[in-house]
Amino acid sequence: MAGKDAFGTQLKRDSNGAGVFVTIANISDLNGPGRQRDAIEMTAHDSPDQYREFAKGLKDGGEVTATINYDPTETSHAALDADFEEDDLRDYQVVLLPGTADEHTWDFSALITDIGDAFPVDDRMERDVTFKISGKPVLTPTG
């Protein structure tokens, strides 16, 4: 098989700081984590064949971005506003292929760096949310 259908992927938040994760409703698009790594240039006058040389630098857990079919009366959407306002990091999960033998879960701590709401005249209300990961995101088989 060439790939897997992403339908059903879930974004969850730790609702009470004790590992009780609640699904954030009405996610239409989800991206990330988008991990990155710095490259430290080590080039010297005697580098072979005048090619730049690099060493591995610090890693960045990246971001998770979500587009939500926004409903201001949905408690999981209001919780994101509270998460944006709080000073502490919160734990989140992205659950891939939930309820299947192939289920995997990304676990990460993050702060919300951006919330943007859109109210177009001819389409649904949307909310875009960016989660900046602090530390290492961990992918675990959970199926």
Image (cartoon, rainbow, N blue to C red):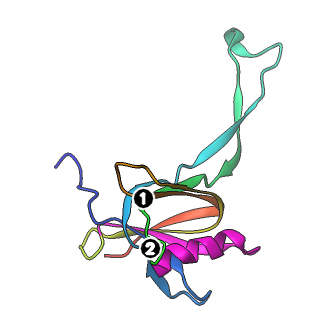
Q: Amino acid at mark 2?
A: Ile
In the rendered image of this protein, does residue 38 appear above or below residue 33? above
Instruction: Give the numbered dot on residue 125.
Output: 1
Q: Could you say whether the residue bearing mark 1 is in a helix, strand or loop?
A: loop
Residue 105 within the segment the image draws in magenta: no
The mark lying in front, picked from 1 and 2, is 1
Residue 85 spot, x, y in % from top left: 71, 71
Please name whichever residue, 25 or 52, is drawn nearer the observer in this view of the structure.
25
Residue at x-position 53% and y-position 66%: 138
Q: Residues within 10 Å of mark 2 (few under 14, many from 20)?
A: some
Residue 76 spot, x, y in % from top left: 48, 77
Q: CA distance from mark 1 to mark 2?
A: 16 Å
Residue 75 spot, x, y in % from top left: 49, 81
Mark 2, residue position? 24
Q: The magenta stretch spans which residues?
A: 74-97
In the rendered image of this protein, does residue 21 appear above or below residue 77? below
Residue at x-position 61% and y-position 45%: 36
- 73 vs 132, left or right, is left
